[in-house]
Image (spheres, helix red, strand yellow):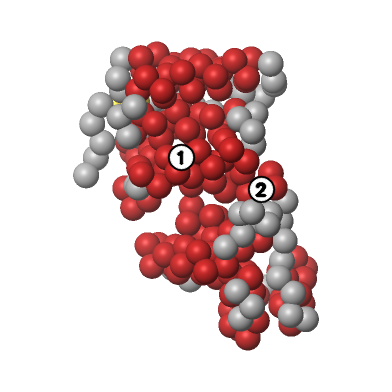
Amino acid sequence: MAYSTLAWYQATGSNEFRNGEAAVLNARRAIEREGSESVDNLKALAAGYAECGDFGEAIATQQKVLDKAGDNSELKKQLGLYQRGLPFRETQSEVVGAYKDLAFHQSAGLARYRDIEHALVNAKEACRLSDRKDVDSLAALATALAANGDFELAISTQQEAIVLAENLSGYALDAMRLCLKRLESGEIEDLQIYIERLENEEIEETPYPWQGLSYEQRPD
């Protein structure tokens, strides 16, 4: 789902973020990697086509979305826009969310999403768009930096995220501080091992799984 999320916001996000060709590429990549023409994947592909001005493909693809999803007013609204030759648009905050979520998946997620170089690029973009005032974007950057071996900068970035989170509500500060300690020990995060241990009932679920457990070795 990470690639389809990025594709969606590349097709529907703010002016400086939009890239229709990249959106189509990432939506197709999501379909290929997941082996599934899911609603989310096809919706992102349709939006990418619309951003590229290929409204014929956008309409045909969005119709597949509706065939799968059934009666959905929001999806019908998107189809109506494409039929009138108009793309769909989202908000800036949603775009930031797409970048940071993809960065987490690429740096510490399941093996099929791993791409630590692009994780760093996407995390930096999330921080840039949010003016480094979004806790999760900073945490994503810290995780990506660690995955790329830059623990010194990862530690300072995680400290920055914690300072920001301390002035806000709703953040799992204990998990974030635990992540900091492990970064200081030269360890990295791995969501795949977290999921496996969770399924085996070896551990309990944490609010921030990517910042609650870390390991020196990643699975193949």
State the residue in front, 214 or 58: 58
State the residue in front, 160 or 102: 160
Circle number at residue 183? none
Number of dots carrying numbers: 2
Q: Is tag 2's residue or tag 1's residue first in the polypeptide sequence? A: 2
Examine the rendered structure and indicate whether residue 82 appears above or below residue 138. below
Which residue is painted at 32% across and 34% down in the image? 148
- Where residue 115 sits in the image (x, y, percent)? 35, 47
**Quadrant including the C terminus:** top left
Circle number at residue 94? 2
Which residue is painted at 70% across and 47% down in the image? 92
Examine the rendered structure and indicate whether residue 57 appears above or below residue 178. below
Label 2 crowd (10 A; few <14 / some 14-19 / many >=20): some
* Res 33 quadrant in image: bottom left
What kind of residue is marked 1? Phe
Dot 1 corresponds to which residue?
A: 104
Circle 2 SS class = helix
What kind of residue is marked 2? Glu
- Where residue 184 sits in the image (x, y, percent)? 35, 14
The single residue placed furthest to the front in the displayed view is 16
Q: Is residue 40 left or right of residue 83?
A: left
Examine the rendered structure and indicate whether residue 75 appears above or below residue 141. below
- Where residue 55 sits in the image (x, y, percent)? 65, 81
* Res 213 quadrant in image: top left
Examine the rendered structure and indicate whether residue 103 appears above or below residue 146. below
Residue 18: tell me if it is visible.
yes
Which residue is painted at 45% across and 28% down in the image? 142
Q: Is residue 116 left or right of residue 19?
A: left
Residue 1: tell me if it is visible.
no
- Where residue 103 sits in the image (x, y, percent)? 46, 42
